[in-house]
Image: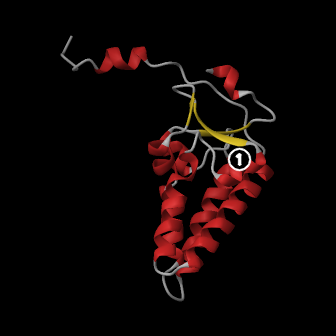
Amino acid sequence: MPETGGILEKQQERTPISVFPKATVLHRFIAKSLDVLIVLGVGELTPPYGFWVALWYVLVADGFSGRSIGKRLIGLQTWVPEVHAPAGFKDSIIRNVPLAAGYVTFHIPYVGWLGAIAILGIEALLIIGNEHGLRIGDELAHTQVVDETIFDVESQT
């Protein structure tokens, strides 16, 4: 057998991925709407620094124990099923890159809002249509948003 550098052994050691119930789509949209209001408010607060603070929030918002402000208020949490733990800052940054791209695109004069709507629209359609509610960012970061009122994630640790 050829030397693989331990890759096969590492793959065998991984915990099987758990399947969590899909979070309520309405709750996800409400939570994200609250976060978008925060981002837009902060972005307009103190130009040009507000843009950078808002972009930072878009990227790291889910890194605080898997909960952005909107998720905290609605009762959602971003979870990493492979390790049975809430999302950290690395997971948050990876999963929110598409949304950050939408925020940056929004600031392109005259046509930027079209790009931002396209990105958010694709993400929203994926949340609705995907069996587990995964959007592009969730696929990249291997995360899933769960509804704490439906599924007790703390019992899974």
Q: Residue furthest top?
A: 1
Q: Find residue 121 and report its horizontal and vertical position in percent.
A: 64, 64
Disc 1 secondary structure class: helix
Q: Name the image quarter holding the N terminus.
A: top left
Side (left or right) of 50 relative to 148: left
* Residue in view at x 61 percent, y 21 percent: 157
Which residue has dot 1 on it? 72
Q: Residue furthest bottom?
A: 110
Q: Amino acid at mark 1?
A: Arg
Q: Is residue 129 above or below residue 114?
A: above
* Residue in view at x 38 percent, y 20 percent: 11
Q: Is residue 29 above or below residue 139?
A: below
Q: Nearer the viewer, residue 47 or 148?
A: 47
Which of the 4 quarters of the picture holds residue 85?
top right
Q: Is residue 10 above or below residue 113?
A: above
Question: Residue 117: in sight, yes or no?
Answer: no
Counting labels gives: 1
